Image (cartoon, helix red, strand yellow):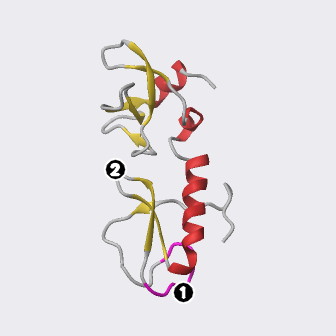
Amino acid sequence: MDLNEDNSINPQRLTFLKALDNCQFCTNPKGPIYCYYTSIGPKMGYVTCEKCCEAGMNAVNLYMKTKAYGEANYLMNKTFNVKLPSGEIESGWKLDPEYTFVDKIWNTNKYGVYCLNPDGRVSNCILLADLLELNPK
């Protein structure tokens, strides 16, 4: 299956899966499944049969290139500034490779992206609007 931005398949939770004859990419899967992760923390990604393994890898690559981190995807592999809850601006942060999605912040109409602090020890959900404002394209 040739995937592109117009016909991409969305990742799904890779938990409680049917372990045989299951595939997001074909209509007649046979045999054991293979999982390809887009986001390790929440266990998101793609499930394929053996014959569709390449499609699974291509789907991960396309997702990471076009959809991961939403509007902040242009910050992938870069360091940037974030606004901390205290209001302080701190530099040297990176997008968290284990949480590659935009998360709706509970009980609000705001969204956040998970980022790692400069030493890589702290992951924090940073408001997407603040991130985009502080780090324009």
Residue 80 x %, y % = 50, 23
Give the number of callouts.
2
Image quarter of residue 107: top left
The image's mark for residue 41 is 2
Please tell me which residue lies in front, 23 or 34: 34
Q: Residues within 10 Å of mark 1 (few under 14, many from 20)?
A: few
Q: Amino acid at mark 2?
A: Gly
Query: In the image, 21: left or right of 9?
Result: left
The image's mark for residue 28 is 1
Any part of residue 108 in sight: yes
Any part of residue 66 in sight: no
Q: Residue furthest top?
A: 88
Residue shown at 31% from the left, 39% from the top? 106
Residue 101 x %, y % = 45, 45
Residue shown at 60% from the left, 22% from the top? 136
Query: In the image, 128: left or right of 58?
Result: left
Residue shown at 34% from the left, 50% from the top? 41
The magenta span reads 23-31
Q: Amino acid at mark 1?
A: Asn
Residue 53 x %, y % = 54, 72
Residue 70 x %, y % = 53, 41
Looking at the image, residue 15 lies above or below residue 66 = below
Which comes before the other along the chain, label 2 or label 1? 1
Image quarter of residue 43: bottom left
Residue shown at 50% from the left, 41% from the top? 69
Label 2 – label 1 distance at C-alpha: 30 Å
The image's mark for residue 58 is none
Which quadrant does the N terminus fall into? bottom right
